[in-house]
Amino acid sequence: MARTRGEREIIAGIRQKAAGRPDGLLAGIGDDCALFCTGEGLVNLVTTDSMVEGVHFDLAWHPAHSLGRKAAAVNISDIAAMGGVPRYALLSLGLTASTQESWLAEFMAGFFSMLDEHRVCLIGGDTVQTGKELMLSVTVLGEGQRERLLCRSGARVGDLVLVSGFLGEAAAGLSLCRQGRQAEACWQRLVAAHLDPVPQVALGRTLAESGLVHAMMDLSDGLATDLAHICAESGVGAEVVAADLPLSGQLLEAAESCCHSALDWALSGGEDYQLLFTAPPDALPALARLPGGASLRPVGRIVAGRGVFLQDGCGQREISYAGYEHFR
Amino acid sequence: MARTRGEREIIAGIRQKAAGRPDGLLAGIGDDCALFCTGEGLVNLVTTDSMVEGVHFDLAWHPAHSLGRKAAAVNISDIAAMGGVPRYALLSLGLTASTQESWLAEFMAGFFSMLDEHRVCLIGGDTVQTGKELMLSVTVLGEGQRERLLCRSGARVGDLVLVSGFLGEAAAGLSLCRQGRQAEACWQRLVAAHLDPVPQVALGRTLAESGLVHAMMDLSDGLATDLAHICAESGVGAEVVAADLPLSGQLLEAAESCCHSALDWALSGGEDYQLLFTAPPDALPALARLPGGASLRPVGRIVAGRGVFLQDGCGQREISYAGYEHFR
């Protein structure tokens, strides 16, 4: 369908901001398709993720700028999760009749700021009008060396299960936002983890290039669900030790303040966009010495069998896929 | 966010159907990203398009199967529009609480049938829950020889403007559906043009490989808007001759029956997904001899200046971007 003048102006503005042309990009916005070359000897990675207002974000507390950053970040994180280099993005914007131009300008500024941090170039997209809810659909393309990229299917019995950073922070931040407490200074790190997550691109590449890691993915759905994916793809099981989960002091304080279980946030909160990976135990010292290695924590191990089990003071129970269930 | 069992079953079913692995595909559904190689000496094409219920389709008359075909077709058409070969697809499904499993099965069967016709492999995607409207966002990747692919920017003063097939049929079909007349046997071709358009992949490749064409795109927004895009990208103007527009007998009958202008459907109806291209006048005999060449019609010419002008019995008037305005 034809675009109105308003839509054409939006697209023209976006196109102008996306005008830089990195090596390998032959044609960006302005044709039926974007054209790009893959680096010599490299393979392509592609991922897509959609975010819907009221399901994945709430405009009541999510500033346009950080929402723009997050829409890009969650896809860049999928490239990071395999150890690839993000290169290109496509953005489908489903705008409502009430979307303000100023909101859109802030959103796009945020989107571009995240792309710029990772030298990702916007090469295509689409704007459509939706009904009541804003909808954002982003595709990110990347590249990497085939023999270095890490899949979910490589976990082996005996591997350690490791994570980067702290768990549950984004879920705690979301809880605080829902309670209208996002402006309280003491929770800024947790709130930022929800509003403006940081994709672990450099660490993902470092881990992939180290040759020490067997399987990797990013923590988007929570440890219980994401580790279940690694187990299912690898044909193995896993045991997670509750006492070993990296929980920050701020998370524990927020849990007390919100009357919520910090463990539940860490296991099933989702949206941390940290890395989850497996590696043999003897790789631990070398992993710790890598750039960013100080943020890595073993939280369990890969075992024979099926399913993800949690060991805590009360014994062992299955937690596979026990994430936040948004589709009933 | 975590998927429920229902969602995981949908994804598992889709993944099973997408299990074929063509040459070049290294990893499909099941990891954070899909991985693929580009054919030697070839470049990548990528395009994305979203369709929203109530804006781009109406479930009252759009059967799930043909909607699935169309969601794939409109993106495959963008690859065809540059003369590329479509290879891979990603599908983001925004489903509502009322989406039935049987509807989704039919939709996916249609989507896969269009992919299969063009040997396109589904390699990734996303399912999310939306509010009231279904939303479909599709990305298609393809490949082609850089020096053969046709952009919008190549039109030259003196070129003929040509189209494939008939114009306005999809718009007429949409009008008939809106009037509840989609079951009337006499309009089946027009209704099918709206519900189940045919991307011109083989013809697009033939035209690109012929070396006879200067600029090309697909007719998604209507001739008035799409030709304005070619003119803007090429820095030229165009004149269209009303009497030369290929209007089928069925279109003229439908125009009379619906009390609508056939010319308006042809110029601004959109969604024909035929090819629009420019070529020098002396290429006309060679174009006519190509496979599919009999469907090609000159409808105007490229001139110096700016804008698209229509010549009819009343003289000449500007029609640039005079398409259906869906974003007010």
Image (cartoon, coloured by chain):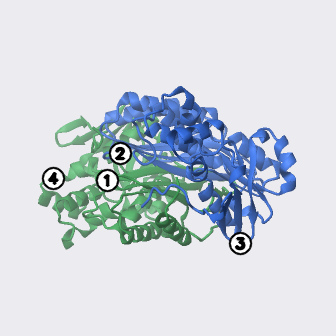
Chain colours: A green, B blue
Within 10 Å of the Cα at label 1, are there few (<14), some (14-19), or many (20+) other Cα atoms? some
Which amino acid, mark 4?
A: His
Toward which corner of the image does residue B322 lie, by quadrant? bottom right
The residue marked by circle 2 belongs to what chain?
B
Residue A117's x, y, as percent? 48, 69
Give the answer, above or below, for where A276 lies relative to A21: above
* Secondary structure under the numbered disc 1 in the rendered image: loop
Residue A244's x, y, as percent? 28, 51
Give the residue number, with chain letter if any, for mark 1.
Answer: A132
Give the residue number, with chain letter if any, for mark 3.
Answer: B305
Residue sitting at 78 percent across and 39 percent down? B294
Nearer to me, B219 or A123: B219
Question: Are labels 4 and 3 on one chain?
Answer: no
The mark lying in front, picked from 4 and 3, is: 3
Question: Are labels 2 and 4 on one chain?
Answer: no
* Secondary structure under the numbered disc 3 in the rendered image: loop
Which amino acid, mark 3?
A: Gly
The residue marked by circle 1 belongs to what chain?
A
Tag 3 or tag 2, which sits nearer the N-term? Answer: 2
